[in-house]
Amino acid sequence: MQVTAVRSSLLHCLRDPGLAGDVSAIEYFPDAITLVRDGLIERVAPADALLSTLGADVLIDDHRGKILVPGFIDTHVHYPQMDVIASYGTQLLDWLNRYTFPAEIKFADRAHADAMATFFLDRLLENGTTTASVFCTVHPQSVDAFFAESEARGLRMIAGKCLMDQNAPDGLRDTATTGYADTKKLIECWHGHARSLYAITPRFAPTSSLAQMDTMRALSTEHPTTYVQSHVAENRAEIAWVAELFPEHRSYLDVYDHYGLLRDKSIYAHCIYLDDVDRARMTAAGATPAFCPTSNLFIGSGLYDLKQALAAGNVVSVGTDVGGGTSYSMLRTLGEAYKVQQLQGTSLSPAYALYLATLGGAKALSLDDKLGSITPGKEADFALLDPAATPLLARRTSLRDDPMDVFFALMTLADDRAIAATYAGGKCVHSRLGSAISF
Ligand code: GUN
Ligand code: ZN
């Protein structure tokens, strides 16, 4: 039995605060103790109420001045695209061909995949992200490398092998038969093993033949507890291409729907150019959009309308989408999400931004019984934010005694320097506070 106690401020969402940010949905303790036992949150209470009840054997990690928040949840990211980040001068389809596919071909080499998985997970943890829905490459060994490393760190992660049998270069295609067989083998090996969860991962409709689409329907039906992750309606040229490839379908989203890929636990990145019928269908099917603001800006894809999606009942979450996206930091990503909404006349409240990156992300992934808030019984994944990480942050966050104002300053100004420490399953997996971590 392992008991950890953390003393800090604490900020989390008890429920959905809505886009305008109902602060009664937010709980804040200026000085709290978070008690963790065997990887789960056992108790949270103001320090003055809890301190005297703790046994002498309980060691307290004293992080007063830091703000404990639930570990961030990044619902769309590609671990093989680390070296694609900040690639100049293209939009989606050219970007894939010029930069992304060549980088992904290298993952045929297991040693390369192992090294990249290690580097990638270091980046997530230094940014306070403890759960992500992750694209690997077409190579099954890229999934083995990823889960081996995430399990060594005790992380709850979702990942899957890209299914792609056409419109991609040599070395980056499977076939309908091998894609199906390899996915089944990976599901058996990893889904539900330790904290790992598997996502059936069609790259996007243009890279799958009709024969492969049929096998993906079979996979989705045969493994209903797995996730599905893909891309939809990101870029105008992509949408025109899908209309040529699948002329009998009403919309791009309808292609996935026809092949049984719109369901609970299905996550679709971007969703910028869905229409009302598509949005209603996503809600009815239980499928969820991942809003990826830094990617949408960097690749020049478009502006996601969050208000419209929420009005249609969509359960929206936020993804970094690196390498299309430009930062592993969910704080930076929320800051850009705010700007994308500002351009459309909507102000994303800091309360809703916090929700999107924590409890809302957990809800989109059907993991809100396990993650997303600091609630007894949930898994002890959290980050400690340092509101004084830089001189500018220290100055700005000291101006107003309002935790949501502090969070807004952090999502606008902060980066990985403001993540003082990250815990997964109650264990410290990243720290800027001086203690050495080894896996
Ligand atoms: N559509 C198909 N593949 C990708 C990808 O790797 N990144 C993004 N942003 N969109 C895609
Ligand atoms: Zn993506």
Image: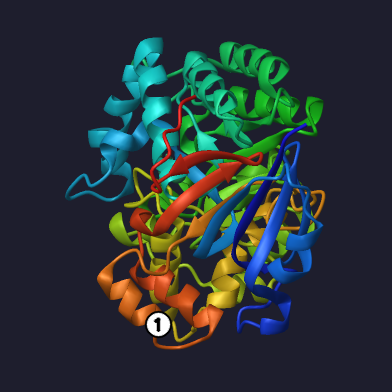
Quarter location, residue 132: top right
- At label 1, counting other C-alpha atoms closer than 10 Å, the crowd grade (few under 14, some 14-19, many 20 or more) is few
Residue beneath the point at 49% across and 14% down = 141
Residue beneath the point at 32% across and 43% down = 93
Q: Nearer the viewer, residue 275 or 101?
A: 101
Task: Identify residue for label 1.
Answer: 398
Residue beneath the point at 82% across and 49% down = 377
**With 173 as the anchor, is 35 left or right in this view?**
right
Q: Is residue 187 above or below residue 313?
A: above
Residue 304 at what x, y percent from top left? 47, 67
Q: Nearer the viewer, residue 73 or 260?
A: 73
Quadrant of the drawing holding the N terminus: top right
Task: Find the residue positioned furthest to the left.
Answer: 89
Residue 71 at what x, y percent from top left? 58, 52
Secondary structure beneath disc 1?
loop
**With 263 as the anchor, is 349 left or right in this view?**
left
**With 292 as the anchor, is 267 left or right in this view?**
right
Q: Nearer the viewer, residue 211 or 102?
A: 102
- Residue 313 in view here: no
Q: Is residue 323 above or below residue 347?
A: above
Residue type pointed to by label 1:
Ser
Quarter location, residue 70: bottom right
**With 273 as the anchor, is 371 left or right in this view?**
right
- Residue 310 in view here: yes
Residue beneath the point at 72% across and 16% down = 188
Q: Nearer the viewer, residue 255 or 111?
A: 111
Residue 346 at what x, y percent from top left? 49, 84
